[in-house]
Image: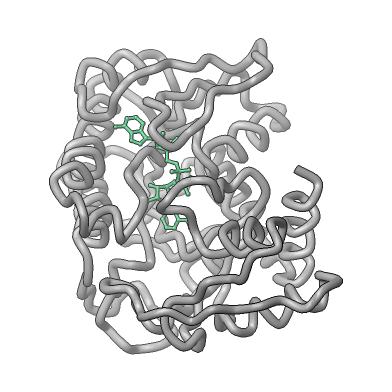
């Protein structure tokens, strides 16, 4: 099988490439990326083809998906604050980009398309756990683009018979996640601060909670769904129903870190949701052998990775 990963040089994409290369049924992996947050491979791999291109160009996407069996669409501008600052760019990359991926997949006869949506689509809906059937109430332009991403994906399944699945990622973390850009996620930012002996910054009181998900579960679920052509008429949460507050993450990091950790609390950020916790029932019914990694173990893995960088 040949697989295209859009955004394949980003955090989740690079981990996914490495995971796919270990699968006997995967022959070649192609990436499409414009390197806005992603990084080029430092060491070329015989089974990996990197294509530089832009999701906003239908021609780029059409060319990149020519001849592949499956597409994993991860490419996006994945940040709530960025979308609030620049909604037009986020809209163009995330919504036009998704439409280009789906239309190109249809034109090229691709057998399976999986796309990255986000728990941010639940937004202002306070219900926990987040069951996929809950009303979606996006709080940011980014969340709107992810709702459009999954809606277009489902529409391509019903309108054109494309085999699709839209995963709602929660807070994915693991090795290779960048801390060195302004829109970095919370765990890499914490780890970079620890490494530099700086205080950790928390927006709000730190009691906001997230369903932190190890990258290994995410790459496993995406890979199995592509190899088995798993489809779903509704979006699927890709998380396991755990919930850890940011203060709780700091407490766990304190156990790993030798010296005392300092935290500075600043004003909450607009667009951020208070609590997030998935229902994993649909994921488990579709992919029963995707197992929930232990959070403390996964946090230690990423802590060690950062400290050795
Ligand atoms: N990491 C998470 O916790 C999380 C949570 C929810 C959803 N997601 C979604 O998962 C996907 C991957 O996220 P990530 O954490 O790996 O982010 P990332 O920023 O590391 O990866 C995104 C990739 O897309 C590429 N890209 C951006 N604009 C592009 C364009 N116009 N053309 C081509 N490539 C472009 C970037 O260069 C980057 O390599 C995104 O769609 C994101 O919205 C991630």
User: Which residue sits at x=62%, y=25%?
Assistant: 26
Residue 147 lies, in percent from the top left, at 23, 59
User: Which residue sits at x=74%, y=70%?
Assistant: 294
Q: Which quadrant of the picture is home to ligand 1?
A: top left
The residue closer to the viewer here, 264 or 63, is 264
Confirm whether residue 236 shows in the render: yes
Quadrant of the rendered structure where residue 189 is? bottom right
Q: Is residue 140 left or right of residue 250?
A: left
In which quadrant will I find the C terminus?
top right
Residue 73 lies, in percent from the top left, at 38, 38
User: Which residue sits at x=36%, y=20%?
Assistant: 65
Confirm whether residue 243 shows in the render: no
The residue closer to the viewer here, 153 or 80, is 80
In which quadrant will I find the N terminus?
top right
Residue 228 lies, in percent from the top left, at 54, 42
User: Which residue sits at x=41%, y=53%?
Assistant: 183
Colour scheme in the image?
one colour
* Residue extending farthest right: 258
Q: Is residue 186 left or right of residue 54?
A: right
Quadrant of the rendered structure where residue 94 is? top left
The residue closer to the viewer here, 164 or 126, is 126
Q: Is residue 185 left or right of residue 20?
A: left
Q: Is residue 23 left or right of residue 57?
A: right
Give the total of numbered labels.
Answer: 0
Residue 57 lies, in percent from the top left, at 20, 22
């Amino acid at each position: 099988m040949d697989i295209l990963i859009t955004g394949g040089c980003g955090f989740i994409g690079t981990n996914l490439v490495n995971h796919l290369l270990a699968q006997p049924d995967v022959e070649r992996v192609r990436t499409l990326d414009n390197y806005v947050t992603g990084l080029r491979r430092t060491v070329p791999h015989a089974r990996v083809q990197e294509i530089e291109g832009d999701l906003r160009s239908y021609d780029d996407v059409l060319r990149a998906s020519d001849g592949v069996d499956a597409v994993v669409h991860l490419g996006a501008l994945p940040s709530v604050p960025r979308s609030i600052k620049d909604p037009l760019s986020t809209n163009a990359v995330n919504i036009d980009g998704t439409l280009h991926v789906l239309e190109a997949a249809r034109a090229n006869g691709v057998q399976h398309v999986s796309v990255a949506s986000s728990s941010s689509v639940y937004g202002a809906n306070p219900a926990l756990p987040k069951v996929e059937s809950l009303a979606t109430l996006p709080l940011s332009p980014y969340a709107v683009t992810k709702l459009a991403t999954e809606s277009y994906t489902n529409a391509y399944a019903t309108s054109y018979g494309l085999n699709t699945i839209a995963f709602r990622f929660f807070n994915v973390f693991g090795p290779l996640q960048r801390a060195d850009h302004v829109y970095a996620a919370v765990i890499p930012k914490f780890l970079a601060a620890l490494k530099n002996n700086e205080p950790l910054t928390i927006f709000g009181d730190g009691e906001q909670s997230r369903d932190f998900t190890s990258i290994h579960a995410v790459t496993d679920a995406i890979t199995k769904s592509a190899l088995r052509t798993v489809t779903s008429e509704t979006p699927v949460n890709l998380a396991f129903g755990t919930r850890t507050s940011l203060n709780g993450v700091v407490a766990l990091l304190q156990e790993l870190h030798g010296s005392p950790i300092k935290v500075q609390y600043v004003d909450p950020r607009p667009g951020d949701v208070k609590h997030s916790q998935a229902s994993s029932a649909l994921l488990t019914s579709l992919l029963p052998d995707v197992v929930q990694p232990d959070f403390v173990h996964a946090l230690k893995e990423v802590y060690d990775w950062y400290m050795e960088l």
